[in-house]
Amino acid sequence: MVAFIFPGQGSQFAGMGKELADNFSVARHVFEEANDVLGFDLSSLCYNGPEETLKLTANTQPAILTTSIASLRVLESETGLVPDFVAGHSLGEFSALVCAGALSFADAVHTVRQRGTFMQEAVPVGTGSMAAILGLDPELLAAVCEEAAEGQVVSPANYNSAGQVVIAGHTEAVARAVDLAKEKGAKRAMLLPVSAPFHCSLMAPAGERLVEVLADINVNELALPVVTNVEATPNQEASHVSDLLVRQVCAPVRWQETITCMVNLGVTRYIEVGPGKVLSGLVKRMAKGSTIQNVQNSTDVSALAS
C-alpha cells in the first residue's frame, strides 16, 4: 500500500516549485490560482524569496501548501499513482485534505493564509519559542516540561520520532526545559528558529479564530482516509474535519504514531509530496524496509513514472 505524506512549516526554501512550474502547466496553474485567491504574487515569493519574507508564518503556510499541491497535481497527471492513505505534518494536513478531496485548493490556501496570520498574532514575537529535544524518553520529557513551567506554558508540541520531540511555550519556560532536559540526559536540546510557539495552549486564540473561518468552508466527503495529527488514526468522515483542524492548532502533532498507524495498516511505500525531505528522513527511521520517495522536481517525477 502507498501513502502520500505532506510537509509542514520549516520545509520552505526560496526557489521551491519553480522547476515544476517551468516544466508542467498543471503546476503553473496551481500557483496562478493561489495568486488569484490571495491577491498577491505568492508564486514569485516561492520562486525567488526573499527568505526572510518567505519565513513569515502568514506567508510560509500558503507557500508550502501551494508548492505541495502543485507537486501533487504533477504526480497525479504524470504517474497516475493513487494513495491508499494520506497524512500531513501540521500545516501539511491541509494538503492531505486537498488530496483526499475534502477541501478545494482555493478554500485550503485561503484558510491557511488566515491560520498563519492567527498563529503569529496569538503570541507576540519573542514571547514564545520552540526547541527540539533529541534522545530523551517522551514520558521523562513531559515531566521535564511540568517542572520547567513554573506557572508558564511549556509542553510537547511535535512527537516526530522515537528520539525527537519538539517542545513549545513561553520563551523562558522553554529555555528552562532545554537546560533541564540536558541535565536529564538528552543527547541534544536546541532552540528552533521559529516565530511562534506552535501546537501548545498559547495558540488557543488562533484556534478560536480558525473556527470562524472554517464555518464558511465547504468540507466534502473524503475519497481517501486521512491519518490525522490529533488522533493518529484514519479519518474519512467529513463531519470530523473542521473540529480536528481546530484542535490541531493547540494539540501536539503525533507524527510518530501516525507513521506507526500506517505501517500497521500495511503501508510499505511513502511518497513525500512537496518541498524538502524532512518527513522522508523521519519515516526512514520509523518504517524500516519501506520504499521512501519524494516529489519536488521533474527528475523526481520521472523516477516515479518509470
Image: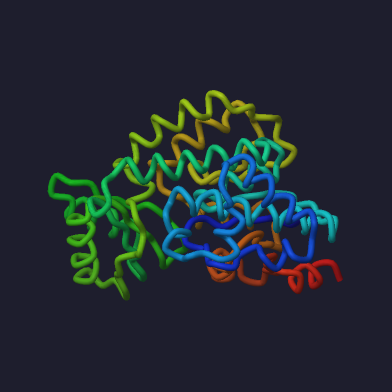
Residue 18 against residue 139 in the figure, above or below: below
Count of numbered marks = 0
Q: Residue at x 38, y 47 (%)?
A: 199
Do we see residue 286 in this rendering? no
Q: Residue at x 32, y 40 (%)?
A: 122
Image quadrant in which you'd find residue 235: top right
**Residue drawn where x is 64% and y is 30% of the image:** 237
Residue 19 placement: quadrant: bottom right
The location of residue 183, given as percent across then percent down, is 19, 71
Q: How is the image coloured?
A: rainbow
The quadrant of the picture occupied by the N terminus is bottom right
Dividing the picture into quadrants, the one containing residue 18 is bottom right
Q: In the displayed structure, would residue 228 be above or below residue 20?
A: above
The residue lying at 48 percent from left, 65 percent from top is 50
Q: Tell which of 274 and 83 is nearer to you.
A: 274
Q: Nearer the viewer, residue 295 or 53?
A: 53
- The image position of residue 168, as x and y in percent, is 31, 53
Viewer-proximal residue among 250 and 64:
64
> Which quadrant would the C terminus be assigned to in this image?
bottom right
Q: Is residue 39 visible?
A: yes
